[in-house]
Image (spheres, rainbow, N blue to C red):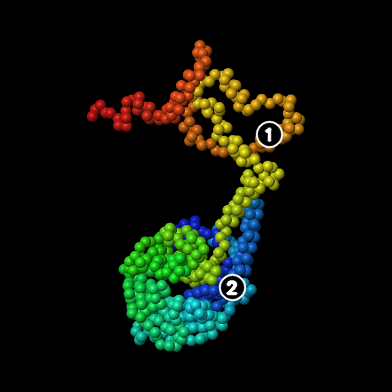
Amino acid sequence: MGKKKSNSANAVRALESTISPIVEINYKDPLFAVAAHPTKPILLQGLATGHVFCTSYDDVKLEEAQVHKREENELLEKEAFAKGKISAINKSVSQTKKKWWTVVPDNSEMDSPLISNMWKTKRHKGSCRSVLFDPLENSVGENIFTVGTDHIIKKAATETGKVLSKTVVDFGGKAADAITKLCHSTSHPFLLAGTENGNVLVYDSSNLSNKLKFRVDKVHDDAVNHILPMPEVSAYHYLSLGSTTLSHIDIRKGIITQSDDQEDELLSMCYATDQSTQAKNDTVLVSHGEGIVTIWKNSKNRLMDQLSRIKVNHSASIDAIIPTMNQDDDEMAASVWCGDSEGLLHRVNYKKGKVVETRVHSTTTKNYGAADEVGVLDIDFDYRLISAGMDSLKIWSNEDRSADGEDNEDDWEDENGSDSDSDREGAGIEDDSSDLDSDLGPSDFSSDSDENEGEEVDDNSEGEGAGDSDGADIDVDDVSDEERQEEEKEEKEVKMPQLVRKKRLNFSLESSRPKPKKKIIDFNKTIPNKEEKEEESKDEPAAKKLKTKQMTTKQIRNLQKHEHGIRKFDDL
């Protein structure tokens, strides 16, 4: 569902994360469906050819391999930059020329210690439309369900791929129809299938050979795009998304409520992360074809209409959305992942109402959007994000390299001659920068008269004050030769220009500070007594306040011409 090419993809890369994939799998045939095992590092993939692949991967070794290769790549780039071979060090994951993560060129030929195919089979005559793992507590992940355009739903064992049961979908002798989406109850053996004509069919997942269990017709005017269980309400209640409406259905009775027409195609939906882990079904986030995510609440208006919207990418459709499932971090718990038709991944904080992180699934673009649109998102057993388009699949790392990136930036500055602590220690020089900075503050650039502004003092008294400012008098004969040499050595070290980092003066304060008056000495005037000095000191704050308030040139000119804002015209 790509749209016209725009510059939005480049704009959102300003939020690009430093997190990279641990593995990338490429496909020669279009990839239609993906599912991640709930408790093991296993992937299920359905292709347009009807083939189904079950792949296992060593997540620990893949993480270690990508970290090791990334560090090597960063070191090589630093060396190349220092030698002038490259103009800048690339810190973007999407713009890197050398991929440090594991890349599989062809999914059908995976046979390595890090990632391999457990089994592969031609499961359906037509394309494989949807795949999922068994979510029931007593058999979690043990079985898989697949459906294809041959209108056959099959149940198979995860370990071997052997078919356990199957059923041919009966559409009731009506117009041509096909299955678009599968969904399974989290507590009961109910397997739901949404169709292209907007119907929802319910089967007994314990034995698919049994007849149809429930049926809800015309839930939507067009294809069913997504089905979501509502376990907190009942095992019989579900949310269905299709065309431009969201429906709340009871598979025994039919439609309970249906939302207002949103005048935009609704593509995918999910619960918030905190509600998904706590089996709550109040807040629902829905992705739209116009590049937005809307927030719905059952407690507010029974999901009759959206309450608020978040702009994600106005030039692309948001084809997939999924919660982060990470409850350990408040930021991640309030976030959901979105995949769009320009190959971008967005982490949206729905409580803040904005995109907070971006990852790039696909960088290659064609005339109409991205070459690999993100159509499927999932979370693996260790909360890693999985993104997939028709051409490739990526499993993303959980390790954030942003902190390391800041350290690397500091290291890069050190290599280019910055005055860091490591430079001083390496040169065998004591770190006196803090003392130097404090000694070179703004007060040191102002004379003693700045502290005594407004006071008229004789030259003799000023000279005496300067002599007493350093404390008690020191006899030169009392100082030994060794102490003199040490003092001279310290003075030389302090005078080294490369170690002195002067603080910038606050020129706004300096400019507003009144200039000291010129000292006028009246020889006929006697020295003021103590009472006169106290009167002058009392008047000093008021004098300072008056001096700090200066008139602008325009105010002086208007004052001279007796004008105040509006000029007087004699002719009017």
Residue count near mark 1 (Cα–Cα under 10 Å), binned few <14, some 14–19, many ≥20: few
**Quarter of the picture holding the C terminus:** top left
Residue 44 percent across, percent down from the top left: 52, 76
Q: Dot 1 lies on which element?
A: helix
Task: Residue 121: give x, y in percent of width and height.
Answer: 54, 82
The answer to which image quadrant residue 212 occupies is: bottom left
User: Eyeballing the image, is 310 above or below 562?
Assistant: below
Instruction: Specify the amino acid type for callout 2.
Output: Tyr
Contact between labelled residues 1 and 2, with CB atoms less than 8 Å apart:
no
Which residue is painted at 72% across and 25% down in the image? Answer: 476
Seen in the picture, residue 286 relative to 524 is either above or below; the reply is below
Residue 209 against residue 380 in the figure, above or below: below
Q: Nearer the viewer, residue 104 or 287?
A: 287
Write down the residue under mark 1: 491
Quadrant housing residue 266: bottom left
Nearer the N terminus, badge 2 or badge 1?
2
Q: Which residue was labeled with disc 2?
A: 57
